[in-house]
Amino acid sequence: MALRVAILFGVAALAGRGAHAYPEFQRYSQQVSGRFVNCAMCHVHPDGPIGLKPGQIGKLTPAELGQLNSARGAFLPGQDVMNPILNEFGNALLKKLGKKRILELRLQPDQLADAYGYESDIDGDGVPDAHEFLQGTDPVDPQNGAPWALFTHNLRRYAFPHLFLLVTATALGLFGMNNLLKWFHQTMDKGSPEPGATGTKH
């Protein structure tokens, strides 16, 4: 048992040499957004890549360790690799920029958003991934974003059909109620005696 634990820690240590988290980006995002930002912005596990928990190096299968080694060699942009300790956003950064550029940007984390670009929106919440990085929100969670940005996006996305149905239903309801009141009024008028009538025959 002790040997097995030692082997696991050894594998984690060896694999971890080329797979460290880059806290410069995390710190910058936290600084400009004023929000708490953990490693889950780019990593599978919120505590980062090193450890024995799911999504960390010590828990990787041999096949995943092979993927990790391939990803560690993705120095140039455009390489189609999948790093098992990174989430979708982290892998998108790696593919778009390449490891060499990411390492350079560690010294200038304020340039990461512009380098990555503002076209990608992985979680489809209407807020580009680069903006989510600057706002300190999760780019792979559509429920996690700046409240006003999510509100305006959802308003644009859902307002027309929902407002159209609401206005139509209200108009039809008012039309129906108006006609019902008219019918009720006419029915009451027909059943009422004429003015001056006593209701008795002589």
Image (cartoon, rainbow, N blue to C red):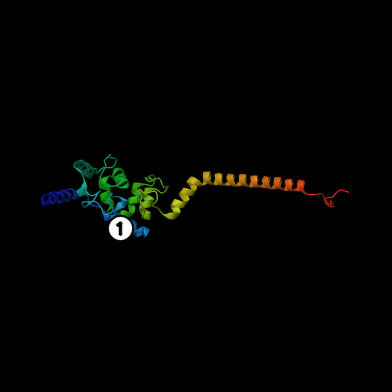
Q: Is 104 situated left or right of 157 in this image?
A: left
Mark 1: which secondary structure? helix
Q: Judge by depth and name the residue closer to the eye, 133 or 67.
A: 67
Residue 89: x %, y % from top left? 32, 47
Name the residue: 52% across, 46% down: 162
Q: Residue furthest front?
A: 202
Q: Position of residue 133 (x, y in %)?
A: 35, 52
Camera sees residue 18: no
Q: Is residue 178 left or right of residue 139?
A: right
Residue nearest the viewer, comparing 5 with 29: 5
The residue sitting at the top extreme is 80
Q: Position of residue 164 (x, y in %)?
A: 56, 44
Instruction: Say whether residue 91 is visible.
Output: yes
Query: Which residue shows up at 28% across the image and 56% down it?
Result: 24
Residue lying at the far right of the rendered structure: 202
Q: Quadrant of residue 82?
A: top left
Label 1, on which residue? 27
Quarter of the image where one finds residue 124? top left
Give the quadrant of residue 66: top left
Query: Looking at the picture, which amino acid does disc 1 mark?
Result: Arg
In this picture, residue 26 sits left or right of residue 194: left
Q: How many marks?
A: 1
Categorize mark 1 by other alpha carbons within 10 Å: few (<14), some (14-19), many (20+).
Answer: some
Left or right: 188 in relation to 176: right
